[in-house]
Image (tube, rainbow, N blue to C red):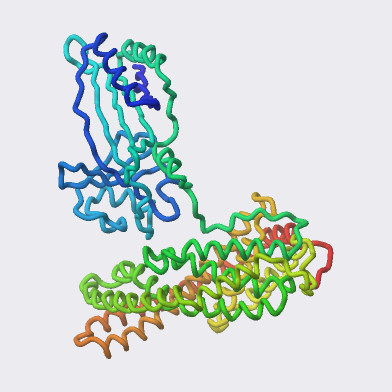
């Protein structure tokens, strides 16, 4: 049996509200028509700061009418916007885990992860449904007229008027007749996602932020010019995340803020003799301060985000004993965040940013750094190849008896290499550079986990001492933390055992050949 295809929904843009009224009159002369009353609602659209829902082609919004005290939280997928999953809410959740509906929570979890839902745009909506009936009073065609206005409404400013046509399977004649009638009006088929229409009207770019560098360097670009482009992009990332970090909207603002700081410090330290030494010395100290003042809050973010994982590592009968630790972390995070916000809104911080912007905005005519005018590809090849050779040499010297500090140092070297490759990624063919980054990342994951397990176990021991000093009756919690610490140290040992295989895969002849082909030029450059 051949399955009939489902009727295709079409959406048209109307120029005037009067077009809809005239169309209704004509349809009433031809068909039996059932018209619902006009409904009015207010809708607020949400997304993460980095547009995760938009990029996945999902939409989340709240909707309510003036006549109802109930507010609904709704989710839809672009391909099927009429199929909405809505739940009643009393308060707009910031994170997916605050949603009570399990189905909606599970849908949004992989899309949002730790990112908060942030308001994007508010609209006033008027909508009306018109059904065309046959002689048996069955619906053979459904139309929905929707008019979107901005909030606050200024001079009744209309964003768009849409007419959606929902055919009914097996009834093509009313659709064709409607299409003939629409030819009399200035209508156009609307294929854009609704959220695009709304945001574009507000002059908003739906995807205005990325934590990627997204640079377009050219091989012959002078190294100083390329460095200024890299550092300017990192400064913009700091600016983009500054307000969200101060307001503590979600933990990713501070994460991306700190990554931009670390990358800046790495660029100043690793890309030799391109920027004037006095400039490097001045701003190395400034960015070291920024790294220091953001450290404690980020640490607390990490432990709070990992808390559920920590509980799951414990025997079920002692999991609840860890709850006191969560309150301890929350309070210390609150205190650290308050201090951080004050520092990031201080005159000192603003002076650093202003001075850095000025330094990057002007090419130094008296820059005596010997690599300043060299082609950036030459400088990039040299720095990446040297850092790669160092990573291989230090990694090959590690065996089962090597102290753990050597693995920590190797992790730092791997991070420096990763940053260098990402700085200059646009200089190399994507098909060649991306696999190298992925291979390096696999090694970094092993080294990062090894470091994290050790740092977390040490920090938990420190937290346990603080808890005993600050909180009465913390004995059971401290005992649970002891079990957790032992488990983390055991995982660290397993990660250490996995290191040899991870490193050997990265250091294989296959990958050495690929790194050599891309970065090892014949020209000796001692920059």
The image quadrant that residue 32 belongs to is top left
Dividing the image into 4 quarters, which one contains the N terminus?
A: top left
Residue 468 spot, x, y in % from top left: 27, 89
| 7 or 163, nearer to the observer | 163
Left or right, 297 with reference to 167: right
Vertical arrangement, residue 423 with respect to residue 333, above or below: above
Image quadrant where residue 221 sits: bottom right
Q: Position of residue 62 (x, y in %)?
A: 27, 46
Q: Is residue 145 left or right of residue 36?
A: right
Extreme front residue here?
155
Whether residue 488 can be seen here: yes
Up the image or down, 522 lies above or below 337; here it is above
Q: What's the residue at 42%, 36% (across, down)?
A: 193
Is residue 490 among the parts visible in the rendering? no
Left or right of 415 on screen, residue 478: left
The answer to which of 16 and 207 lies nearer the viewer is 16
Q: How many marks?
A: 0
Q: Is residue 154 above or below residue 388?
A: above
Q: In the orientation shown, which residue stands out farthest toward the bottom? A: 469
Name the quarter where the C terminus is drawn: bottom right
Task: Name the residue nearer the viewer: 224 or 152.
Answer: 152
Residue drawn at x 35%, y 20% is 3
Point out residue 249 in the picture as x, y percentages from the top left corner.
37, 63
Nearest the viewer among 128 and 336 is: 128
């Amino acid at each position: 049996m051949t399955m009939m295809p489902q009727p295709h929904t079409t959406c048209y843009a109307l120029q005037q509200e009067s077009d809809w009224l005239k169309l209704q009159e004509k349809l009433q002369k031809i068909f039996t028509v059932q018209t619902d009353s006009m409904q009015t609602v207010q809708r607020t659209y949400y997304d993460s700061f980095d547009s995760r829902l938009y990029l996945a082609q999902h939409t989340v919004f709240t909707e309510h009418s003036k006549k109802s005290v109930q507010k609904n939280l709704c989710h839809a997928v672009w391909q099927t916007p009429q199929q909405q999953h809505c739940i009643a809410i009393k308060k707009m959740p910031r994170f997916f885990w605050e949603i009570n509906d399990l189905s909606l929570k599970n849908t949004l979890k992989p899309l949002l992860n730790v990112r908060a839902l942030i308001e994007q745009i508010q609209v006033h909506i008027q909508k009306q449904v018109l059904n065309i009936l046959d002689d048996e009073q069955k619906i053979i065609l459904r139309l929905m007229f929707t008019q979107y206005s901005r909030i606050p409404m200024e001079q009744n400013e209309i964003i768009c008027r849409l007419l959606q046509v929902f055919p009914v399977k097996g009834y093509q004649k009313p659709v064709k007749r409607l299409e003939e009638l629409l030819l009399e009006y200035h209508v156009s088929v609307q294929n854009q996602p609704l959220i695009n229409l709304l945001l574009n009207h507000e002059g908003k770019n739906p995807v205005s932020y990325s934590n990627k560098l997204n640079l377009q360097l050219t091989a012959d670009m002078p190294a100083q010019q390329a460095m200024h482009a890299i550092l300017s992009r990192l400064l913009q990332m700091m600016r983009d995340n500054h307000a969200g970090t101060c307001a503590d909207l979600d933990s990713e603002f501070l994460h991306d803020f700190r990554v931009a700081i670390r990358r800046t410090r790495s660029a100043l330290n690793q890309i030799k003799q391109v920027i004037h030494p006095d400039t490097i010395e001045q701003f190395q100290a400034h960015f070291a301060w920024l790294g220091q003042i953001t450290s404690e809050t980020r640490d607390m973010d990490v432990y709070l985000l990992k808390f559920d994982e920590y509980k799951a590592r414990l025997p079920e009968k002692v999991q609840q004993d860890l709850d006191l630790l969560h309150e301890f972390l929350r309070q210390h995070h609150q205190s650290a965040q308050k201090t951080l916000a004050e520092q990031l809104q201080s005159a000192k911080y603003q002076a650093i940013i202003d001075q850095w912007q000025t330094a990057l905005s002007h090419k130094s005519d008296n820059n005596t750094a010997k690599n300043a005018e060299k082609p950036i590809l030459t400088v990039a090849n040299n720095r990446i190849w040297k850092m790669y050779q160092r990573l291989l040499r230090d990694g090959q010297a590690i065996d089962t008896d090597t102290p753990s500090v050597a693995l920590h140092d190797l992790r730092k070297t791997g991070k420096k290499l990763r940053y260098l490759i990402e700085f200059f990624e646009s200089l190399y063919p994507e098909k060649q550079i991306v696999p190298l980054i992925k291979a390096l990342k696999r090694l970094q994951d092993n080294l990062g986990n090894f470091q994290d397990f050790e740092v977390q176990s040490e920090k938990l021991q420190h937290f346990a001492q603080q808890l005993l000093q600050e909180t009465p009756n913390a004995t059971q919690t401290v005992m649970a933390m002891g079990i957790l610490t032992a488990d983390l140290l055991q995982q660290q040992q397993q990660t250490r055992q996995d290191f040899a295989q991870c490193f050997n895969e990265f250091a294989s002849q296959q990958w050495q050949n690929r790194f050599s082909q891309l970065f090892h030029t014949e020209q000796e450059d001692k920059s």
